[in-house]
Image (cartoon, grey):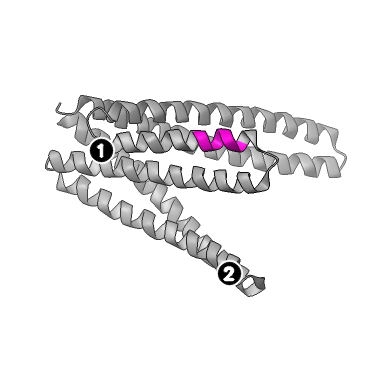
């Protein structure tokens, strides 16, 4: 095995993404249960309200725990992989900046301007982490002469660029033009970006799985 640290790291990153996906699904269930709780309260059904409320609490706690575990595993995975490829070091820097932005946002939670800035920074850092992880895998694939994994990574980076560009265009349309028509156009673009984002996430998981196998076999 030529890159044992990267192999260990990418495996952890893959597991972290799986946990994040499960946590996201659990969060959706929690949201559905919150709606059931509200409906039960409106209908004055104590049994429905209590049952759905307890279920919502359990799923919220479960999702939070999964997200925390996934985040820790991602940090450890990126740290491990950075020992074999410098792109992961840049990903780690972006992770730390994102953490810092989240902390600042928590401290100044009552300041709307600071909140907006820190949320933007956090989103950007999350994007950069993904980009640098993929870039790192591409470089490792090139060193191992695996053209398939390298090409898939390049295509995935292009897709991520398109998704981010569409989201940015949607935000700019609302910001610059405003009004109902602009909101509708931005909404359509946002939906397209969301669908592409789901495709990207599936491709990202598939790519991490291929990278994990590649590093384990070489």
Q: Check disc 1: other Cα within 10 Å, few if <14, some if 14-19, many if 20+.
A: many
Residue sitting nearer the eye, 121 or 189: 121
What percent of the width, then of the height, locates residue 97? 45, 37
Q: Check disc 2: other Cα within 10 Å, few if <14, some if 14-19, many if 20+.
A: few
| Residue ID for mark 2 | 176
* Residue for point 26% across, 40% down: 136
Q: Nearer the viewer, mark 1 or mark 2?
A: 2
**Residue 27 as seen in the image, left or right of residue 193:** right
* Residue for point 20% across, 32% down: 215
* Above or below for 109 versus 62: below
What percent of the width, then of the height, locates residue 105? 60, 38
* Above or below for 203 versus 72: below
**Quadrant in which the N terminus appears:** top left
Residues shaded magenta: 100-105
The picture quadrant where one finds residue 38 is top right
What percent of the width, then of the height, locates residue 176? 58, 69
| Residue ID for mark 1 | 211
* Residue at the outermost left position: 145
SS at mark 2 in the image: helix
* Residue for point 18% across, 48% down: 148
SS at mark 1 in the image: helix
């Amino acid at each position: 095995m030529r890159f044992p640290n990267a192999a260990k790291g990418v495996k952890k990153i893959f597991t972290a993404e799986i946990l994040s996906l499960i946590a996201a699904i659990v969060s959706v269930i929690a949201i559905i249960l919150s709606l059931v709780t509200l409906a039960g309260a409106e209908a004055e059904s104590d049994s429905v309200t209590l049952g759905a409320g307890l279920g919502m609490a359990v799923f919220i706690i479960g999702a939070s725990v999964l997200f925390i575990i996934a985040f820790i595993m991602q940090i450890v995975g990126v740290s491990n992989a950075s020992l074999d490829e410098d792109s992961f070091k840049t990903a780690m820097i972006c992770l730390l900046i994102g953490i810092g932005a989240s902390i600042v946002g928590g401290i100044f939670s009552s300041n709307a301007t600071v909140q907006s800035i820190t949320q933007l920074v956090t989103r950007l850092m999350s994007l950069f982490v993904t980009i640098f992880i993929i870039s790192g895998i591409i470089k490792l694939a090139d060193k191992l002469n695996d053209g398939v994994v390298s090409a898939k990574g390049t295509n995935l980076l292009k897709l991520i660029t398109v998704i981010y560009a569409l989201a940015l265009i949607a935000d700019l349309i609302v910001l610059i033009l405003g009004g109902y028509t602009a909101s509708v156009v931005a909404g359509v673009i946002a939906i397209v970006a969301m669908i592409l984002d789901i495709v990207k996430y599936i491709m990202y998981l598939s790519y991490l799985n291929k990278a994990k196998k590649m590093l384990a076999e070489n």
